[in-house]
Amino acid sequence: MNSERPIGIAGAGSIGCFVGGMLAAGGRRVALLARPRIIGEIATHGLRLTSFDGLDRRLAAGQLELSENPDVFANAAVVLVTVKSADSAGMAELIARHAPNDAVIVSLQNGVGNTALLREKLPGWRVLGGMVPYNVIALGEGRFHRATSGDIVIEKDAAETAKKLTVPGLKTRASDDIVALQWGKLLFNLNNALNALADQPLRRQLAQRAWRRLFADQVAEALVAIRAEGIKPVSTAPLPVSFMPPLLRLPDALFEIVLGRTMKIDPEARSSMWEDLQRGRRTEIDYLQGVITTIAERRGLAAPLSRRIVELIRKAEADGKGSPGLTPEQVRG
């Protein structure tokens, strides 16, 4: 029996189950705080982890600690927060009540404000920012499929937490400037909403220049707002963020060559926001395009495209019919 202190997964959805499962497969002791539906799937089918690059690993339910009770964090050495941004405050309260004070808290969430919020809610805990560059699709029956490439990055610390979260098939790197990387990831995540509105696999959507131009215009609009705040985002890809708009506007054939050299995307991958619309869940639009519109309003800047996309996503949420399957022209209005 593994007697080491466990790594807690605070919110075992798609990212939480994949990362937690990979850590468990690598010999780490892992405790998942999950909803009954996820616990039921894993209890019945086990946990299966697959990836665009051919990974296929299976874990029996007994290889993980599964619970819907936050007491599962009682002896955690590390707690990985993987809930959606709107749930960060509530999860922080659970961690404060149930996790030991010496546990390291790591935010593996979308958006740029979660680390600060967790630090505010968890005084006395060591809280590290993080960034997960890839998306994971929940395929049902306990299967979670990694659909895009990249390595997890977390804030560098003296305890070398990044090394402790690295196992075969799951690399975690340390960064001296995680905030800049989180802003860079936000720029990439602006396509989440476009993919959700398009109702197409990511690769097919990004293969169309009209969608890429829409993405490029969003990034350009966002960069004006972000730089007005004095923020210098760092790309999560090999190319600088300033290259994103011209790269996205390239003809299809040229773009496909560049994309193939910088990022791998499963043919059926879709954004988590698309999945949220399909399942009737609240999206993270307020923490992506919503961040840009808030900055623009504060700075007296125009951000019409970001505002339009926020409106379209909110309408799709309210309609409750899944993705509306819009064209780029309809999104532009």
Image: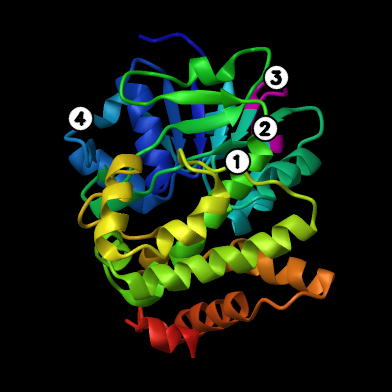
What residue sits 78% from the left and 60% below the top?
228
| Residue type pointed to by label 4 | Arg
Question: Against 325, is 296 above or below?
Answer: above
Q: How far is mark 4 from mark 2, CA to CA?
A: 33 Å
| Residue type pointed to by label 1 | Leu
Q: How far is mark 1 from mark 2, CA to CA?
A: 7 Å
The answer to whether residue 233 is visible is yes
| Magenta-tinted stretch | 96-104
Residue 96 image-quadrant placement: top right
Which residue bears the numbered disc 3?
102
Which residue bears the numbered disc 2?
177
On screen, residue 127 versus residue 71, left or right, reads right
Frontmost residue, 139 versus 269: 269
On screen, residue 142 versus residue 101, left or right, reads left
Q: Which mark is residue 181?
A: 1
Q: How far is mark 4 from mark 1, CA to CA?
A: 30 Å
